[in-house]
Image (spheres, rainbow, N blue to C red):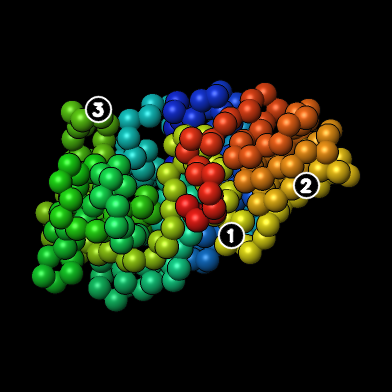
Amino acid sequence: MIGVILAAGKGTRMEPFSTRYPKPILPICNKPLLHYQIEMMKEMDIEEIIIVIGHLGHEIAQALGDGRYPGVKIRYVEQKETLGIAHALGKLESYISSPILMSLGDVFFVTEDLKSMKEKMIANNASVVLAVKYEDDPEVIKRNFTVLLGDDNRAKRVIEKPRHITTKIKGCGLYLFDQHVFDAIRRTPRTAMRDEYEITDTIQIVIEDEFPVLIADVVKWDMNVTFPADVLTCNLHQLKKLGKKTVIGDSTDIHFGAKIENSVVGDGVVIQHPIKITNTVIFPYTVVTSTENIDRFIVAPEHQIDCRQFIQEKNPIDLV
């Protein structure tokens, strides 16, 4: 099995970060988002990963190194045109001759029993296994895709950004494919909705070809990192998962009177004054000059993002 991580998007809604940081390397508890995805793939005994890069791809390569990541070989492939997920995967056909675990590089996943995806594929001779989450909020499903099951518990339809919700099954941007996917990609039309080659259309073609498409309830929490406040939400969730109140990076210079609670402080951060910092992420090598307390902010070297309208004041950790 080979891993594929799609990390070529521009992330225009992530302004002001998108001009400096590709979304897949934004820090979650002082580790790039991609590190979590790589570790997730290593759990599946994957030893080779292709990362599709585009916008600021050199920053991704710099963050991950020359491909000698511990326990796995990383290869970078550039996507010159961003024409959708199916288009990106189709460009990799010449590199791949085995099953593929593919993830979207701007999604933070918390998974459980991930290997059951592979077990389902083998036991049922399936062509596709979709990682899903049972979601109670219809609005969240509308922003992703949903799966309708037949009486045999095989997928009979996948719907991108559905307008009407009839199921709680939400697709999560994590897919297991066999080689049939490439034949389906060649027959995937460019859609009117986003002028792209949608992977959900590809999966529907596999279904119509009568190859088994199954789901696996392996995603316990996920976040599409779309807006700056999503980075803070992911950090707060990971802090909670780790059972920690703070994560402090190396080589920091923190004023002895400063108090830090439920926050992440990156490497090389300087905090100059005895302030209180709560529910906040401070990016690496940021000098914090504020003399006022900071709550529910993302503080980076060039920018400060106020997330208070997105993260409630009362018990913000309850949101994650």
Measure the C-alpha gap from mark 2 to mark 1.
Answer: 19 Å
In the rendered structure, the answer to whether residue 12 lies left or right of residue 34 reads: left
Q: Is mark 2 on a helix, strand or loop?
A: strand
Residue at image position (18%, 35%) is 189
Q: Which of 301 and 306 is in front in this view?
A: 306
Residue at the outermost front position = 314
Q: Give amino acid for label 3.
A: Asp
Pointer 2 residue: 259
Rendering coords of residue 183 (x, y %): 23, 48
Pointer 3 residue: 195
Question: Foreground mark, 3 or 2?
Answer: 2
Q: Which of 74 and 220 is in front in this view?
A: 220
Residue at image position (31%, 57%) is 135
Residue 116 position by quadrant = bottom left
Q: In this picture, is 146 found above or below 25?
A: below
Q: Give amino acid for label 1.
A: Lys
Q: In this picture, is 267 found above or below 243?
A: above
Rendering coords of residue 22 (x, y %): 54, 33
Q: Which of 305 and 168 is in front in this view?
A: 305
Q: In this picture, is 289 found above or below 152?
A: above
Pointer 1 residue: 240
In the rendered structure, the answer to whether residue 243 lies left or right of residue 144 reads: right
Q: Is mark 3 on a helix, strand or loop?
A: loop
Q: Is residue 268 visible?
A: no
For marks 1 and 3, the one nearer the N-term is 3
Rendering coords of residue 59 (x, y %): 62, 32
Measure the C-alpha gap from mark 3 to mark 2.
Answer: 49 Å
Rendering coords of residue 248 (x, y %): 75, 50
Q: Give amino acid for label 2.
A: Lys
Q: Can residue 281 be seen in this view?
A: yes
- Number of residues whose C-alpha sits closer than 10 Å to that of mark 3, classed few (under 14), some (14–19) or many (20 or more): few
